[in-house]
Amino acid sequence: MKIDILTIFPEMFTGFINSSIIKRAINDKKVEINIHNFRDYSKDPHKCVDDYPYGGGQGMVLMPQPIFDAVEDLKNSDTKIILLSPQGTKYNQKKAYELAKEKNLMFICGHYEGFDERIRTLVDEEISIGDYVLTGGELASMVITDSVVRLIPGVINENSHLKESFNDGLLDYPVYTRPADFRGLKVPEVLLSGHHANIEKYRQEERIRITREKRPDLLKK
């Protein structure tokens, strides 16, 4: 998979692409992640990418020219272009699986007060990671990229994500490690029993209990 991220703050991604599973996936050539500064595409002498909104209002608006030129230069026939926007469809695990099947994802990260509306004509989909406002789309692009890359075959063990939270509408079961008794807090006996059928039954019951207590809305769905 290839992922292109368009931003005016490329330095924000230094730690992200050079750490943990993302770095390993890049080194193993499971994914190629390119960070593009669309300020480089500005035709303004000062490389300006924003301007005041027509009709007045607060803040500055990203201009169409730099983003149009960047997208047209970088996209190919396999590129799925995604605008990160509060107006987009709310992101979830199902969407992560859908995006993991794509060959090339391109994320456009907004900033300031918003986008020139004409930029929306470039995109295939708008996505929001939640009902709150960020200063820009950079963090949202990292969240989606992280959740997608880990689903690419060979990046992590497949069993590690098949039974994770949200895959079947339930949250994950509780996990424990050594010691078996820490300050009087003990690991459930069933997990120490070695009886795999009983352990699986316990874990499924715990998933239902935890989902009912913490996210009952998932059970309603």
Image (spheres, rainbow, N blue to C red):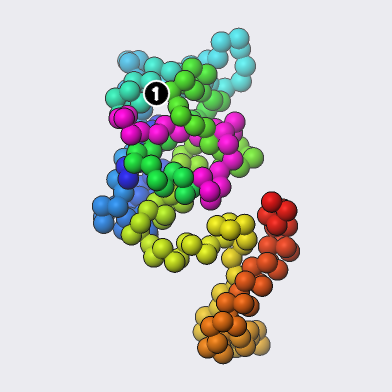
Tell me residue 26's x, y (percent). 29, 52
Q: Is residue 107 magenta?
A: no
Q: Circle 1 sits in a helix, a strand or a loop, which is it? A: helix
Name which residue type carries label 1.
Ile
Identify which residue is drawn at 73% across, 53% down: 220
Quadrant position of residue 33: top left
Identify which residue is drawn at 61% across, 20% down: 58
Q: Is residue 76 magenta?
A: yes
Q: Which residues are magenta?
A: 75-95
Quadrant position of residue 70: top left
Crowding at label 1, few (<14), some or many (≥20) Cα neighbours within 10 Å?
many
| Residue 173 or residue 21, whichever sits in front | 173
| Residue 12 or residue 66, whichever sits in front | 66
Check disc 1 and report the residue beneath it.
67
Tell me residue 125's x, y (percent). 49, 32
Q: Left or right: 221 with respect to 177?
A: right
Identify which residue is drawn at 46% across, 45% down: 98
Q: Is residue 189 above or below residue 39?
A: below
